[in-house]
Amino acid sequence: QVQLVESGGGLVQAGGSLRLSCTASGSTFSINAMGWYRQAPGKQRELVARIASGGTTGYADSVKGRFTISRDNAKNTMYLLMNGLKPEDTAVYYCNAQRTVVYVLYDYWGQGTQVTVSS
């Protein structure tokens, strides 16, 4: 099992910055990729950014050039630095970790942290 705890959300004005953190505990040695998702009211959950165990990253087009995902494997912590925030970035942000055990893929989720961007 893997437990994920997010922190760093809050209220910020448009153009501002926030840094989200996600700390993993439990069977972290077998985690492959990690990522950040978000869900705005009335919308489906969407992928924001993803980082593989080797460091390869990917971003949604809507956040490219503004958000940066990183990972500190020694601390079992993943970060999302969000610059140039826009009101449309307002959502609950969820941390995700994927773990493969005997060829079976498991998904784990954090409880979510609210990010609100005022115009």
Image (spheres, helix red, strand yellow):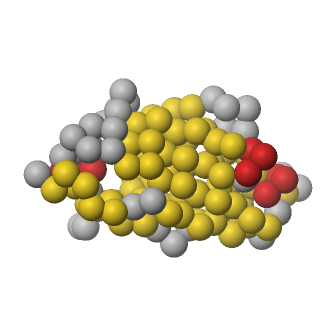
Is residue 11 toward the left or the right of residue 79 in the image? left
Q: Which residue is at the front of the view, 10 or 104?
A: 10
> Which residue is found at the position 58% from the left and 39% from the top?
70
Q: Residue furthest left?
A: 119
Which quarter of the rendering shows the N terminus? bottom right
Is residue 73 toward the left or the right of residue 7 in the image? right
Is residue 14 toward the left or the right of residue 93 in the image? left
Which image quarter: residue 21? bottom right
- Residue 62 pos. (x, y %): 30, 36
Is residue 33 toward the left or the right of residue 110 in the image? right
Does residue 117 show up? yes
- Residue 13 pos. (x, y %): 19, 51
> Which residue is found at the position 48% from the left and 45% from the top?
80
As drawn, 79 above or below 11: above
- Residue 89 pos. (x, y %): 27, 50
How many marks do you count on the picture? 0
Q: Residue furthest right?
A: 102
- Residue 72 pos. (x, y %): 69, 43
> Which residue is found at the position 45% from the left and 59% from the top?
8
Does residue 60 show up? no
> Which residue is found at the position 78% from the left and 46% from the top?
74
Which image quarter: residue 91? bottom left
